Image (cartoon, rainbow, N blue to C red):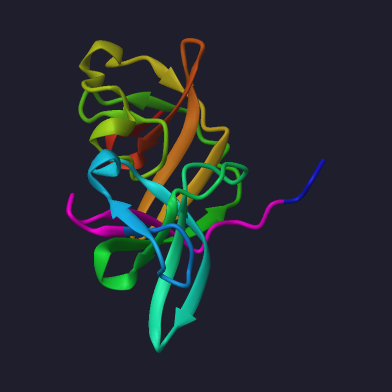
């Protein structure tokens, strides 16, 4: 198994007209419109002509979508936490996502009220900014849920 470093940040692109650069040299680009509403991981950061650029990826092993200037993205720090052995119940509020801190396009279930009272056991826990997110199974699907939408059993 190949060890993959944890991301430095999660990021969302601010506006559809932001430029996504194909390489860090900023030679060719395209607009970010197709990526609005998605959450990305940042594993790499570079300085180019005194400006900070970040490479955005959907997963640790996927190809980057490209490089974005620091002013084009919203960041939150990413930190893996020890596995949470606590068992939770769904409170019936919130949503769940394919990524922690997910965006509109990352939604799996737009309303968790249908799962109210059902048990949820975290398989992985991360801190995004000041928020804790848990990865667990909802049926046969792996999903990320922010801890404010879970109740301790």
Q: Does the magenta stretch include residue 9?
A: yes
User: Which residue, as the protein is rendered here, is positioned at the far bottom?
Assistant: 50
What kind of secondary structure does the magenta stretch mostly adopt?
loop
Q: Which residue is drawn at 51% across and 26% down?
A: 121
Q: Is residue 21 left or right of residue 87?
A: left
Of 82 and 95, the residue lying toward us: 95
Q: Which residue is drawn at 33% across and 70% down?
A: 69
Q: In this view, does 46 lie to the left or right of 153?
A: right
Tag count: 0
The quarter of the displayed image where residue 127 is located: bottom left
Q: In this view, does 59 lie to the left or right of 110?
A: right
Q: Which residue is drawn at 30% across and 42% down?
A: 35
Of 66 and 91, the residue lying toward us: 66
Q: Is residue 71 left or right of residue 147?
A: left
Q: Does the magenta stretch include residue 72?
A: no
Q: Where the C terminus falls, by quadrant?
A: top left
Q: Where the N terminus falls, by quadrant?
A: top right
Give coordinates of residue 86: x percent, y percent. Answer: 51, 35
Of 126 and 119, the residue lying toward us: 126
The quarter of the displayed image where residue 109 is located: top left
Q: Residue at x 79, y 46 (%)?
A: 2
Give coordinates of residue 80: x percent, y percent. Answer: 55, 54
Indicate whether 80 appears above or below 75. Answer: above
Indicate whether 48 appears above or below 16. Answer: below
| Region in magenta | 4-19
Give coordinates of residue 60: x percent, y percent. Answer: 59, 46
User: Which residue, as the protein is rendered here, is positioned at the far front?
Assistant: 27
Give coordinates of residue 116: x percent, y percent. Answer: 27, 16
């Amino acid at each position: 198994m190949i060890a993959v470093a944890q991301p430095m940040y999660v990021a969302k692109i601010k506006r559809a007209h932001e430029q996504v650069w194909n390489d860090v040299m900023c030679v060719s680009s395209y607009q970010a419109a197709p990526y609005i509403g998605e959450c990305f991981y940042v594993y790499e950061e570079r300085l180019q002509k005194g400006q900070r650029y970040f490479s955005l990826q959907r997963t640790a092993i996927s190809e980057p979508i490209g490089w974005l200037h620091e002013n084009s993205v919203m960041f939150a720090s990413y930190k893996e936490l020890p596995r949470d052995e606590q068992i939770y119940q769904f409170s019936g509020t919130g949503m769940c996502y394919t990524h922690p801190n997910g965006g509109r396009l990352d939604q799996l279930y737009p309303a968790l009220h249908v799962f109210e009272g059902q048990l949820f056991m975290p398989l992985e826990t991360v801190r995004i900014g000041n928020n804790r997110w848990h990865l667990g199974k909802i049926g046969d699907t792996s999903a990320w849920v922010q801890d404010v939408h879970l109740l301790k059993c």
